[in-house]
Amino acid sequence: MSDYIVTARKWRPMVFGEVAGQAHITTTLRNAIATQRLAHAYLFSGPRGVGKTTTARLLAKAVNCANPVDQNPDNKCESCTEITEGRSFDVLEIDGASNRGVDEIRNLREAVRYAPAKGRFKVYIIDEVHMLTKEAFNALLKTLEEPPPHILFIFATTEINKVPATILSRCQRFDFRRIKTDDIASNLRAIAATEGLKADDDALLLIARKGDGSLRDAQSLFDQVVALCGKEITTAKMVEALNMVDQEVYFRVTDLIKSGDVKGGLALVEDIMSKGHDLREFLAGLTEHFRNLLVAKSTGATDLIEAADVYRQRYAAEAGSFRVADLLRLQRLVNGTEAAIRWAAQPRFRLEADIVQMISMPQAREVGDLVAQLDELKKKAGEHTLPAPQGAVSRPAPPLMRRPPAPPVRSAAPATSAGPSLAHGELASRWQEFLGEVRNTRISLWPTMENAQLLGVDGSIVKLGCPDAFQASMVTKNRDALADLFFKVFKVRPQLVTEVTEGGSAAAEAPLSGTAFPASESGEEHPVIAALRRELGAEPL
């Protein structure tokens, strides 16, 4: 019979200092032992494989050890040996998943009355305590609140949300953390050195990352890699043996995006499929790849990237080729693909389409750059607009965006006019004065009135021509406010009538509105329109 023991059991911590990544808990427990301030119940919560049950056993050994060393068990006395081998009558480990009923808890309540056989404390370790039924929890409450002085309860769970508040309030709670990738890699490196194995740092780091914060998961994968690769563990052997996606594949994706090589993108998908890689694993790695580029681009450092030094240097160099907005768009696209590919009838086709979209996606423009360009265009527009001569009727130049044709909009005009009359000559000569009053008091109406044409005056009826139906409706909606401004300038309150004109008068000059750009007298293209073509790629309609 083989004496082989898996790494997770063989290298289980024997003292508090060997528990990886949980110093905030082990220090507290050692201080509690030193000051004799032990609670009667502890609750250990956290993800799998981070040391909950191991710490519970260490605490049980430490409180019952005959010769403790610096609040650590000596692992030599009879009590420590029995607990380590799992044959101690004073330490009972109970699986909450298989002993979850009220009858089991009743038996436990009867058993706690008896004193420990050898040690100071009788310790009950209940693993996966959240699996107990509601009735079992209620049966445990009284014993848990007022246990005999020789009893110590230690509960462990991965789902703290399922433990009732009545139980939580009677325990000291300790939250175990996910173990850092570097700490897991250091643990594996020490194990490999002790076992006489030759392992690349890159390979150990890759195993640690696959552990995803769980030391036990990483150690189990380490055993598998050793069985596959033998005494020498290299990244190439491990990637081939476990059929993992090589890190170079992800850098190949970004190279294809930079070069815009759609054909290469489709060849990449073919390569992934032919090697039998899991598409979700590939997309998860691609998401992390874009995340690492985003970190390097945003922070200018690689400290937050979990990768070997050689890859950190590559991320720092590659980040300069992308904008933050581009990396965010790429990451969102990959996340959407990862979510949709589970239900796609043809996952390969969905991956090919999204890879092509990534490669073909135009580079994002920073909002600040666009705002600066628009401000510059406004300045140029202001420099090249010419004031209309006094008394002239203005007409707008053809707009950049073509509106759909609209039927003429005419307001109903009364048959006869009433009130004081307006002279057309006076109205035309003081039109700019009226527009100035509109601009000073009702700036929202100024562009509309600036584009309007004075078609005629009939008594107190003023007929205005508007270039489109929208501006005509603006005059109609604000007829009373405009009449008040007329009265302020001309001492006459007119009735405004609007009409949609087609092109306006041929002799009229261009208006002062910032929404239209007149052509230069020489027939050359206006500089603002030329800038729109050059900077933003605008095309005439």
Image (cartoon, helix red, strand yellow):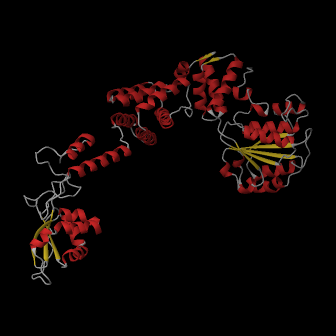
Residue 265 higher or lower than 382, as above or below: above
Q: Quadrant of residue 270?
A: top left
Q: Is residue 181 left or right of residue 1?
A: left
Q: Position of residue 179 (x, y in %)?
A: 65, 35
Coordinates of residue 326 in the picture (x, y in percent): 40, 38
Percent position of residue 57, x then y: 79, 37
Quarter holding the N terminus is top right
Q: Residue 282 location, x and y as percent?
A: 47, 32
Look at the picture and state if 523 lies above or below 397.
Answer: above
Q: How many marks?
A: 0
Q: Judge by depth and name the residue closer to the eye, 423 or 466.
A: 423
Q: Residue furthest left?
A: 506
Give the residue drawn at x 45%, y 24%: 275
Q: Report the side of 206 relative to 35 (left or right).
A: left
- Residue shown at 21% from the left, 72% from the top: 476
Front-most of residues 73 and 158: 73
Q: In front here: 135 or 457? A: 457
Residue 96 visible in rendering: no
Taking 465 as reference, is 207 left or right?
A: right
